[in-house]
Amino acid sequence: MDQNPSMAGMNASPSQPKSGGLMKMIVTAKGGQFAKWAPMPLRLTLAIIFIFHGLTKVFGPQPGLEGFTGFLTSLNVPIPGFFGIFIAWLELVGGFAFLLGFLTPLFAKLIALELIVAWFLTKLGGGLMVNGIVAGELDIAIVGLAIALAMLGAGPLSIDAKLARKYQR
């Protein structure tokens, strides 16, 4: 059977990807040159969340250290005065550490542990619902961000990277 001469030698239009090309494009991450920057949005997201929460726990107006310690007391947390101060400052200092990329894996692990304990203390009975309100999934998402950041490290634009370069010499 004769082909149309204008179509001879052409199997597909130039705008269509080669076999498997479209699927490869869909399922393949644009890693390579951008993969090293993956920690940046994770760090910034956690920085915003924990600077805000740390500020409100440390300085108020709500809940402030007294209110947060009272909340921990109501949950029967042992030595609530110590843990109230520790968690409030962990969130504040950890938020700034995420922003700067300083001791990132350490703070990411501590924040993940804090939120896992908090989830068990406050949301375990309701699953993802607390008093009929969806609430637990945000904690789970933040734990996922923190674990990913603990695994990835802070990335190239960080104090951690600068320290690593300094001590590898």
Image: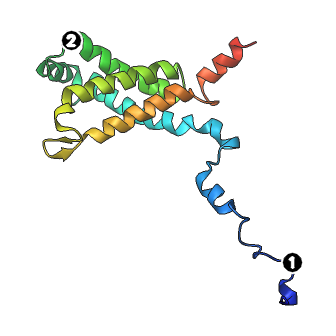
Mark 1 vs mark 2: in front: 1
Q: Residue at (18%, 11%) from the top-left corner? A: 78
Q: Residue 160 appears at what percent x and percent y? A: 59, 21
Badge 2 amino acid:
Gly
Is residue 59 at least partly visible in the picture? Answer: no
Q: How is the image coloured?
A: rainbow
Q: In the picture shown, does residue 9 fall above or below 81? A: below
Picture quarter containing residue 114?
A: top left
Q: Residue at (38%, 25%) from the top-left corner? A: 112
Q: Residue at (65%, 55%) from the top-left corner? A: 24
Q: Which residue position is annotated with label 2?
A: 81
Instruction: Using residue 73 as the reference point, say whether residue 140 is left or right of it.
Output: right
Q: Residue 27 appears at what percent x and percent y? A: 59, 53
Kindly check if marks 1 and 2 are in contact, taking CB atoms under 8 A apart as contact. Answer: no
Q: Which residue position is annotated with label 1?
A: 9
Quadrant the C terminus occupies? top right
Label whose residue precedes the other's in the sequence (1 or 2) = 1
